[in-house]
Amino acid sequence: MTDLDKLRYPIGRFNAAAAGTCDEQIETVRRLPERLREAVSGLSEAQLDTPYREGGWTVRQLVHHVADSHANAYIRFKLALTENNPAINAYDEAEWARLPDSRMPVDVSLAFTTAIHARLVNLLETMSDADYEKSFRHPERGTVTLANNLALYAWHSLHHTAHITRLRERMGW
């Protein structure tokens, strides 16, 4: 892995086979709001506006991205649970990160992530094994089961939190 890859993928690339059990993944998703809040705790405005790597998003943009992404995940779970393999929309994450709401205080997205995760975790905990086999169609990734989507968002939770914590370690914050 190159130095750039280590910065881009601080916990490694997504690997569904190495993602742990469903219960472990749900626990990771449950703990994201707390871990994300801890990761940015005490950072100054200048630190929040520091990119986690050259050419990468700022800490502020990462926090807002997690809120955007996990809101989309919640909707995708609900669509797959209520429709037969629905087609979902992809979105341009980089463009979303450039929108004005990605410059807001991080507390807004921390609260939003906490609320979305309360609902998402409740939904995940009530799903049956058969529910986890339901799927949606992603325009770039093809058919995605809800089991795979859970694994992806557990990884995503750790991935972006690690961007922030590793930046803090490198910068001595």
Image: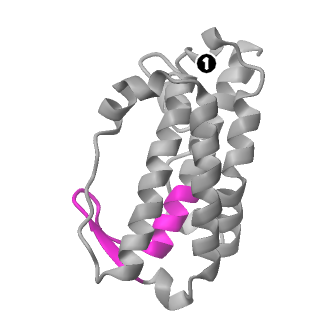
Question: For the image shown, how many numbered marks are present on the structure?
Answer: 1
Quadrant of res 134:
bottom left
Above-or-below relation of 135 to 88 = below
Q: Which residues are magenta?
A: 134-154
Residue 20 x %, y %: 65, 68
Residue 45 x %, y %: 63, 12
Residue 91 vs residue 102: left or right?
left
Above-or-below relation of 99 to 78 = above
Say which residue appears at 35% left-offset and 38% top-offset.
93
Above-or-below relation of 63 to 22 = above
* Residue 19 visible somewhere in the drawing: no
Name which residue type carries label 1.
Answer: Leu
Say which residue appears at 72% left-offset and 18% top-offset.
43
Residue 79 x %, y %: 36, 72
Residue 165 vs residue 71: left or right?
right
- Mark 1, Cα crowd under 10 Å, few <14 / some 14-19 / many 20+, is many
Say which residue appears at 49% left-offset and 90% top-offset.
130
Say which residue appears at 63% left-offset and 66% top-offset.
121
Closer-to-camera residue (144/131): 131
Query: Which residue was labeled with disc 1?
Result: 48
* Residue 119 visible somewhere in the drawing: yes
- Identify the element where label 1 is drawn: helix
Q: Is residue 114 magenta?
A: no
Residue 31 x %, y %: 72, 54
Image quadrant containing the C terminus? top right
